[in-house]
Amino acid sequence: MSDASSDRNRLAGAASPYLQQHADNPVNWQPWDDDALAEARERDVPIFLSVGYSACHWCHVMAEESFEDPEVAEVLNENFVPIKVDREERPDLDRVYQTVCQLVTGGGGWPLSAFLTPEGKPFYVGTYFPPEPQPGRNVPGFEQLCGQIADSWSDPEQREEMENRAEQWTSAARDRMAPADSPDGATDPPSSEILDDAAAAAIRGADRQHGGFGRGSPKFPQPGRVELLLRVAALSDDPEPLTVAENALNAMGSGGLYDHLGGGFHRYCVDEDWTVPHFEKMAYDNATIPAAFLAGYRATGRERYAEIVRETLEFAERELSHPEGGFFSTLDARSETPDSRLDEGEAPEREEGAFYVWTPTEVREVLDEPAATLFCRRYGVVSGGNFEGGTSVLNETVPVAELVGAEIEVAGETVETPDDEDEIRDLLDDARERLFTAREERPRPLRDEKVLAGWNGLLIETFARAGFVLGDDARIERAQSALEFVREHLWDADANRLSRRFKDGQVGIDAALEDYAFLGRGAFELYQATGDVAPLAFALDLAGVVADSFYDAEDGTLYLSPNDGEELVARPQELTDQSTPSSVGAAVSLLLDLDHFSDDDLGAVARETLATHRGRIEASPVEHGTLAMAADAAERGSLELTVAAEELPAAWRETLADRHLPGAVVARRPPTESGLQAWLDELGLDEAPPIWAGREARDGEPTVYACRSRTCSPPETDLEAALDWVEENL
């Protein structure tokens, strides 16, 4: 038997904060590694696989109820090899077993609880299991379930049934994740019509009453659908896509999903009207959601959307920043009860949302009148609250206009509010600042200080784009520092390989497709924002690895894990948009954009992947939104704006910031051929790619060349004229 046998808990040395949270459990947790898998085979017992992440509320609940219970631990340790996985570190493992869970139960999520054969094939799956049976819901208690499975495994007949089920489920998962033949043997990517089909499906699924998508609860933000609708709105005269997108943005920005004091977005809302969130804050949400608000700002000019972007990036910089430049992963949903809610002698507990919620008394301890009453009315802080313990999640419940010149009864007295709306707004702004300062004194949620390559890529992309659009060079510089951090700590230039995770000086885990794709998109966005060739070179390096190591030419697709990666029971792909964009969609988009700058045929890999999945995309375009947008770009062609200039003129930056040009490629280059040659040398190119070739500055003036579908405007020293030419001629 291996020295690393499961007679002890082996998580103490793990870099993952989530695994460290379970290092003191009486369960003898093992990490997913060769020793743990060998242990299961040697003992001939099933694996109990638990997948979660550090900010997951129900992961904490199940841990406290079951994994900290010595009796449950005894059953697990004697009859199983218990393995704990951080889904943020191992998206490939998570995707395989989530796929099985979705196939078998119709749903998924975290904690994911899967019982596997010693070979890793699942035969029983679920998510959260309570400690005691719940007969009305036909849910067994966890200890009872473990005992039943152990007994069945020891019975030869029942074990054979379990192994047969494992084979069937594994085969089904392989089929679900395998490439599927496109209809009628088609070998072309989907047409641009797929974008309209996706938008139509998103509009059909819109919640017209509460905003967002889907009826009932919970409510997930779905920023990719908002960006898709805004893209369609920019390409058509139909007002409906813009209306639905704005409704979703307004709901997300005014309800409890948004932190109205500190900026940033929580994970999702538990109700249909966006009132109460699950309070964890994820790095990826605070990259993708503000990106949708930024697109909304460019499409509508609504200043509130820009404010939300600024406040969210301020949150990310303030609370998720590694001192040396990267971004951390998550903030927990739970924190200790503030002193203001404790009776004398009462010990604090870790409660979900405790850091963020308020009571009227707490507000009035900080604010004088009329600011206290104005704030409570504006943000729905009422006696009895809308959350646990009589507390209130802040929501914009009363429009500011209704607070002007109002007489409001408070504790038997009348509070009169100012007659001037601007004065009320000033009072509310000051109130938010003072309450934010007071909130900073509360016990804080725990922070998962992993730095993940892909999630940093999402933040780099949003910081760079927001800095450019909002005229905030400090945000661009923050994107640069994050990219430099990731390159220094996670990129091996000699091996041309990326690692996924950095934590406390430890680097580990081979990067997944999402890491290369998201980071590549971030680097490319930084090139467009700065006109610096270095991030473009890095983006091309990452795209090259995507094409070489994640693309399977025989299957015609991009996989989540590299071709030489660990062999799992099924090889996962991420085709649909989940809590993050589809990694295949993001990679295809990156390859299409960078095909303009490379002498490798990156576009061929992108188009072949789109063609392979045409049937699935066409069958459910809104679920494949990122791929649908990539398919549109592949057929329609990106708007290419080649800018030959030492510096981007201020007026041009204003124009590009104000115009909503979804999918446009801003191909900046030096104004002269000699300057361009230095760039080509750095990129290792023998000759200029077509997007740069022959497009130098004219008469020493910044010059733009606007092209789409191989049709170009004349060289222009007036950017507005070039854009007008495109609209009139294409």
Image (cartoon, rainbow, N blue to C red):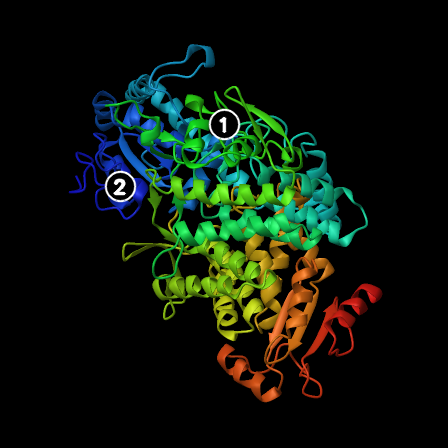
Q: Nearer the viewer, residue 608 or 310?
A: 310
Q: Which quarter shows the N terminus?
A: top left
What is the number of callouts on the image? 2
Q: Is residue 93 left or right of residue 554?
A: left
Q: Quadrant of residue 498?
A: bottom left
State the residue lying farthest toward the top. Answer: 135
Classify residue 264 as left or right of residue 233.
left
**Crowd around label 2: few <14 · some 14–19 · many ≥20 (10 Å):** some
Q: Nearer the viewer, residue 504 or 687?
A: 504
The residue at 42%/61% (across/down) is 482
**Mark 2 lies on residue:** 20
What percent of the width, then of the height, locates residue 347? 25, 26
Secondary structure category for the residue under label 2: helix
Rounded to the nearest angstrom, the CA distance separating label 2 from label 1 is 31 Å
In the picture shown, does residue 14 fall above or below 525?
above
**Is residue 434 visible in the rendered structure shown here?**
yes
Residue 581 visible in the displayed image? no
Of tags 2 and 1, the one toward the viewer is 2
Of marks 2 and 1, which one's residue comes earlier in the chain?
A: 2
What is the three-letter code of the residue carrying label 1? Val
Tag 1: Cα neighbours inside 10 Å, few (<14), some, or many (≥20)? some
* Percent of width and height locating residue 724: 80, 67
Q: Nearer the viewer, residue 488 or 271?
A: 271
**Residue in view at x 61 percent, y 27 percent:** 407
Residue beneath disc 1: 104
Q: Nearer the viewer, residue 423 or 528?
A: 423
Q: Secondary structure at mark 1?
A: helix
